[in-house]
Structures are given as C-alpha cells and as structure tokens.
Image (spheres, helix red, strand yellow):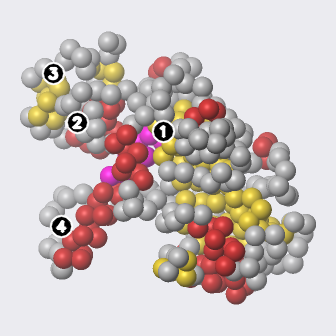
Amino acid sequence: MSAERLQKVLASAGIASRRDCEEYIADGRVMVNGKVVRVPGTRVDPENDEILVDGTPIGKIHHRTYVMLHKPAGVVSTTDDPQGRPTVVDLVDLEQRLFPVGRLDYDSEGLLLLTDDGELTQQLTHPSHQIEKEYRVLLNAVPSPDALRAWRTGVELDGAPTAPAWVELIERVPEGAWVRVILHEGRKRQIREVARLLGYEVLRLIRVREGSLALGDLPSGTWRFLTDDEVDMLREHAEQGAMAAEAEQLDRRGPREEAAPGSRRVRRVNPPSRFFQAGERIAGETPLTADDMIGPEDEAPRRAGDKQRADYGTGRGDRDTSSDNWGNERGPGGYRGERREERGPGGYRG
C-alpha cells in the first residue's frame, strides 16, 4: 500500500476528525514504529507501520466513499423501491454499495449525501444530531406576514409544536413566491405540512445546504465526490452532535461542574446564512418590511463575500441550472482522500 498522510490515516481509522488528528500529532500523542511523530503530513504505511495514539494501536483502516447528489423530483431516497420507481442509488454509477444519509421526499429536490460509512451515517441521522438545513420553497401564493410569523415561531404538527425556524420571503413570482426556510429538526414532510396548515401549497422544495455543505451549482440528477475538507466537516458535525447530546443529558441530571482547563468546547461550524435586510428590494417589487422578513436582525448575519441572490426558477418546470449559484461554488472534481494538488484528477475514497 502506498504511503498516506498520518492525519488522514488516523481519521480513516475513526480516531477523530482530520483537524483534531493534526492536533493529536502536534501534541506528541501519536507514535509511529516506536517514535513520537509531531509533524502533521508525515507519510506512513497503515498496513506495515505500527501506529499508536495515546499508547493504543489504531483500528483497521476503512476506505470510505462520500458522495453529494443533486436529487431530482420523482426519485425515491432509498436503495430499492417495491413499486419500481427510480432510486437515488440508480443515479450514482459506482461499484460501492452506498446508502443515503437521511431522506428527501419523492417530490423534493436538492442536496442528498450518500456513503458506505455506516458509523458516520448513524451519527448524522441520530435524533440528537440537529444539523442546520436550508431549503428554497416555492409556494402557490405570497405568504402573509402573520403566516411567516407563525411558521417562524412554530405551529402544532402531529400533536407537538415545531421548533423555531428561520423563514423569509425571497422573491415574488407569477406562480406565488419563493421563501427560504432554515430548520434544525427533520420531521416527516415538515415543510409541506406546515405550509398546508397555514393555507399554502408547496409547488417545489429544494434543499440547498446541510450544515456547511452547499449544493452550489451541481446540476440536477448529477453527483460528485466530497472533498477532503467536506468529509472532515461531516466528522466534526458528528462529534459536535455527540457532545451536544451528552451536554443535554448532563443538563437534565442537574448542575454541572465547570469544565477542566484545556477541555474541548463545542464550536459552531455551520456558516451563517445570508439574509435580506428590511427595505431591500426584490426583483423590482416594493421594499420588504420587517414583517415580510420575520426575524430579529441580530439573528441574520450576512455571509462574508455574499453579494447577489440566485434565481431559483419560476415554476414547476426545469430550471436553468447555470443560475443555481447556491452556497459555495465547487466544480465536479472528486475526493478520494488526498487533496487534489497532491493526487491529480482522481476522486476520493478516504
């Protein structure tokens, strides 16, 4: 087996995220063939070299595949379908058996992750892991300020209130209006059902972001490998979800002792989304009021470098994907464990 970067080997063995593994190395906690290694990026052979972290040998290295798919409408988010409908795995032409991380409804579109990393999938889909998800939603009419306010604060759904969400009007179109919805929970058909309760019909629903992963300009029905940094962000999300769940359990038990010096803290890795400010014009329409937007200004920071919103289409039909410039723009290049400048045009299996 060819030599690989030490921090990548540790991350692939499930020790921690790549960034945390770099800290382990710099702190002198990693030994290779009996010697402490303090330089991240050191090349090792995981099959022949003896690698220890805090004196314990690392586990078996698993080379995993991580894929982002732009799911089109009319495709089920499962590995097979008794009704014979097309599935998301039919759209990814790889030999590996991949599984979707979570789901999108049959009629919904947008970002969906697939992987053969069962442990990470379980962590990311656990109820305690409330990763931020952003959607573009086309409604059949322009929502009233009262409807937006109710949506934002929560409505009764299946006997329980929905969690607070960020909801804002983006654009008025002949078919109705596009709104942005950002959720931290994932109840079944939540957006469609809440819209129905408020008196509106969802014509299109597109997931454009999940945590720090953005759909970007990936065309509908196509996929790409995740990059090194994106996989690392997923692992960080999973770690944060586990720590948040542990903190919640401690809160339920009673007062906690103060954290010891040098202990890890949960840090936010979801990027702030770009929100429109009161009075900003929408495609030549009248200025939005604060009620149109619904939401305090201090909860709506702008994303650095974000200037112009994208055109999200005007109806049910196919949209011009060249203008779907949501989030971070990335090309279709692949990820198989090494950074592109080090590995050439190959993909990722790390």
Q: Where is residue 141 in the image (x, y as percent from the top left)?
A: 82, 74
Marks 2 & 4, CB-CB < 8 Å contact: no
Q: State the residue in front, 325 or 163.
A: 163
Are there few (<14), some (14-19), or many (20+) residues within 10 Å of tag 2? Answer: many
Disc on the earlier residue, 3 or 1: 3
Q: What residue type is labelled 1?
A: Phe
Q: Nearer the observer, disc 3 or disc 2?
A: 3
Q: State the residue in front, 281 or 131.
A: 131
Which residue occupies 54% across, 32% down?
225
**Principal SS element in the magenta part?**
helix
Q: Is residue 75 something one can see in this rendering?
A: yes
| Badge number at residue 50 | 3
Image quarter where the C terminus lies is: top left
Are there few (<14), some (14-19), or many (20+) residues within 10 Å of tag 3? Answer: some
Marks 3 & 1, CB-CB < 8 Å contact: no
- Left or right: residue 101 compared with residue 235: right
Q: Position of residue 230 (x, y in %)?
A: 48, 41
Residue 25 picture quarter: top left
The residue under label 4 is: 259
Q: Which amino acid does label 2 sit on?
A: Ile
Q: Nearer the observer, disc 3 or disc 1?
A: 1
**Residue that protrudes farthest toward the top in the picture:** 1
The residue under label 1 is: 99
Disc on the earlier residue, 2 or 4: 2
Residue 157 picture quarter: bottom right
| Badge number at residue 253 | none
Boundaries of the magenta span: 230-239
